[in-house]
Every structure is written in structure tokens, then in C-alpha cells.
Amino acid sequence: MLRAGNIVLNILSLVVVGAGMLVIGTFFFPSAFLDSGSKNLVSGAGPGEFNVPIVPESATAEEPIQKTVPASAEKSHEAPAEKRPVYSPKDNTLTLTVPAMARIEGDEIPTGNGKEERLFRNYAAVHLEGTGFPWQRGANTYIAGHRLGYPGTESFLTFADLNRLGNGDRIRVRDANGRRYLYEVYRIFVVGPAEIHVTGPVEGKSVLTLQTCTLPDYSKRLIVRAERIT
């Protein structure tokens, strides 16, 4: 009887140890637990989506921006003033630095859509196609990255500590021409996968948005919003 009890205890111990190893493995090496019929454990979505929004041609703003034409302008018959050329680098690649995050320092950020998993593997994060750029007034520059990512790639654990950012933390961005933009975090919140409005402009502000998946099930999006201060 005593021997049977010991056998049962040994079996239970092995089950507990095995479960613990599985949890540890899925946390640190999520890509190793994928198969053709499973979901991507990094994101809770398919390998090419990982909970990143696909931005439509006209993203919905958090608060619709009303654009009105002054009555004086409608009535005026004077020749319009000559406009200065709008600044825009030929290369849209950005460089991102977040001092409060361990792995984001001078990282190259390309532009792509939410299904380009190649970009999300090979870079720390991706600027979402269809959202604004730092040099545009009133833009929402939307950058998304993996929470865990893939070992051996640039994506590994890059946004793992995004949740450590707090109001007042600074975020630095540089464009391809070397022009620098400084942002300050002012809002942190969580949204569901269907809430596409977070990619749209924010009335009266030029903002940068950082996004990653929530833990432990990657089912929602952690959003860190920062306002441009220079």
C-alpha cells in the first residue's frame, strides 16, 4: 500500500514538473510550440497578424477633427499666398529610442502592414502603413512590436517591458535625414483587437503610439500614447 502511494506521488510530481516546463517554454520560446494547426503563441493570432491592426485608407480618429473653411477665405478673390514646400524625407525609415525600455535604443523601424510578419521578425518594431509620420503636423505615428518575439531575431523581447513606461517618460525618434523628434508619454490603456480608432489622429496633438500584446494570453493590445513636445 505504501509503495503504491509512493508511485502515485512520483507520477504527480512528474506531471507538475512537466506542466511547469511547458509554461516556461511557451514564455521564453513561443515559436518552438507552433504547429500547422495551432495559433501563434506570441500574439494569440495567426503568424502573419499577431494582433496588429490593418489600417484602412481613412482611419477613424479618436475624436473627429472638424475642418472648416473661414468665411473670409470663401469670399476672397485674392491670389493665394505661395506655400512653402512640405518637409518629407525620401526614405520613411525611422529610428526609435526609449530610455525606459531595455532593448529599444537606436532601433531601425521600417514601414509595413500588420500582415508582414517578415518585418516583425527582423526588426524591433514596425511603423504601421497608413498612419502618420513625425514630420506631419497632427499625425499619429503608430509603431507596433512583439511582446515576446522570436529567439535569435531582432524581435525577441523588444517590447516585453512596454508596460513599464509611465506618464512623463520620454521617447525619441529620428528620421532618415537625421531630424529628431521628442515625445512624452501621457496616456496608457488597453483596447481590444477590433478597436481600430487607436490608429487615427488625436485632435489637437501630434502623437506617437506604441503597441504590443497583453499578457498572459495576448488577446488585447497594450497602448502607450506620447505627445510630441519638440
Image (cartoon, helix red, strand yellow):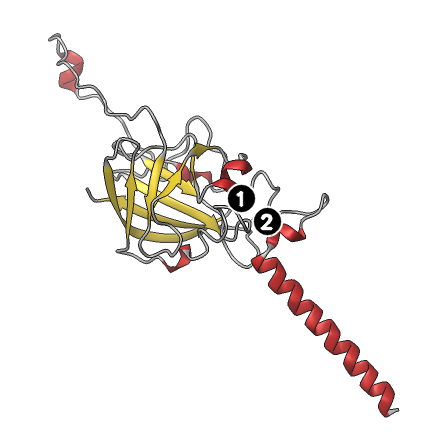
Q: Nearer the viewer, residue 215 or 10?
A: 10
Q: In screen coordinates, is 163 left or right of 77?
A: right
Tell me the quarter of the picture where residue 85 sits.
top left
Amino acid at pointer 1? Asn
Residue 29 vs residue 230: left or right? right
In the depicted view, which residue is nearer to us: 192 or 104? 104
First reached walking from the N terminus: tag 2 or tag 1: 2
> Dots 2 and 1: beta carbons under 8 Å?
yes
Q: Nearer the viewer, residue 209 or 193?
A: 209
Q: Which residue is pictured at 44% across the width and 26% down the height?
A: 57
Residue furthest out toward the bottom: 2
Local packing at callout 1 (Cα closer than 10 Å; few below 14, some 14-19, many 20+) is many
Image location (x, y in percent) of residue 206: 27, 38
The crowding category of the residue bearing disc 2, from other C-alpha atoms within 10 Å (few below 14, some 14 to 19, many at least 20), is some
Q: Position of residue 186 (x, y in %)?
A: 29, 52
**Residue carrying label 1:** 51
Which disc is residue 44 wearing? Answer: 2
Q: Is residue 60 left or right of residue 29?
A: left
Position of residue 39 measured from the top left corner of the image (x, y, whole percent): 65, 47
Disc 2 element = loop
Q: Amino acid at mark 2?
A: Gly
Residue appearing at x 34%, y 32% in the figure? 132
Q: Is residue 141 visible?
A: yes
Q: Residue at x 45, y 51 (%)?
A: 158
